[in-house]
Image (spheres, rainbow, N blue to C red):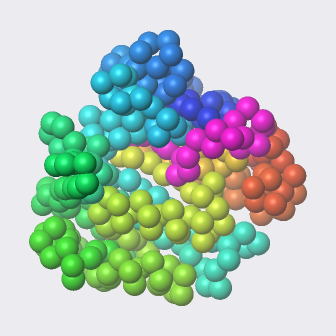
Amino acid sequence: MRLLALPGDGIGPEITAATLRVLAALDLGLEVEIADIGLKALAGQGSTLPAGVLQKAAGADGVILGPVSHLDYPPRDKGGINPSSELRVKLDLYANIRPNRSREGLSILKKPMDLILVRENTEGFYSDRNMFAGSGEFMPDEDMALSVRKVTAKASARVARVAFDLARGRRRKVTAVHKANVLKLSDGLFLREVRRVAADYPDVQLEELIVDAAAAHLIRRPDSFDVIVTTNMFGDILSDEAAELSGSLGLGGSVNRGDSVCVAQAQHGSAPDIAGQDRANPCSLILSAAMLLDWMAARHGAPKLAEAGRRITAAVEAVLADPAGRTADLGGPLGTAGFTDRVIAALA
């Protein structure tokens, strides 16, 4: 099977290399191609996401995407394309799956957390991806800025179905997070579709929770959540909150998945201030790659890949359990390479 690795910007090349080392240690017979995106591609090819890269991603069995510094990109007409959002829209990666669990000695929570957040990935308030043409954000005059929120029945229903499928294999509860008390039409439509999907899963409990309360309850009662499903922006914010509460943004795995393509992507940003210093925590992208292997296993009927994903996750957890095996951002002594060495040793 073929993987496409897109190292990206900042610490992206370092944590991508670390992730590929872990995959190589399992001898899975994966064929890996590396392609430039981001600032390096802009300098060499005139675009942060060359057209050929998008085609390669569409044809790959899986994609590993490093973080990108899209805030530093020029306008789109000068080659500045956000690879993350472009891949999500062009490849229809409609579900962003972000699991989070608390770890002893790392989490600040008083109660345990073990949840999966399922985030709609292609519309909502994200103005760079919610229009067929043009931007969903605009300025009628110099003192007024407007932004359009897009919520469709199709997108809401299919992301809800992903959430219910995941919950059926876990503790059989889905929490739909919304702001329908204010966004009556758009979140009302989202909830309508979630409820319709819920009718097909009578064995799964549906809870509905306003986003304000959800943010608080992640702290107060994190053990009450199993699978959360929500719209794009709420999911982005709440999943970052959950990751930080569980120990660090650097610990959160994430995949963007559609029906035929899946992209592993760390939850955190490109951290250019520590790039090239062997200080980056590669944990998030390594765990994301493990999730990618699980998706590939299900799609291609390859149980060996699912087992490899479980082994990677277990190895990461074993290393994190020892304070001496953690990176500096977690209070440990290790750098990127040292942490990766520990994970590979735990796989043996």
* Residue drawn at 50 percent across, 16 percent down: 43
**Residue lying farthest top?**
44
Q: Nearer the viewer, residue 193 or 300?
A: 193
* Residue drawn at 49 percent across, 35 percent down: 72
In the rendered image, the quadrant that contains the C terminus is top right
Q: Is residue 35 above or below residue 246?
A: above
Q: Is residue 198 left or right of residue 120?
A: left
User: Which segment is the magenta one?
Assistant: 259-280
Q: Main secondary structure of the magenta part?
A: loop
Q: How many marks?
A: 0
* Residue drawn at 36 percent across, 16 percent down: 52
Q: Is residue 266 magenta?
A: yes
In x, y percent, where is residue 254? 48, 51
Q: Nearer the viewer, residue 301 or 45?
A: 45
**Residue lying farthest front?**
142
Q: Is residue 245 left or right of residue 325?
A: left
Q: Is residue 325 left or right of residue 255?
A: right
Q: Is residue 267 magenta?
A: yes
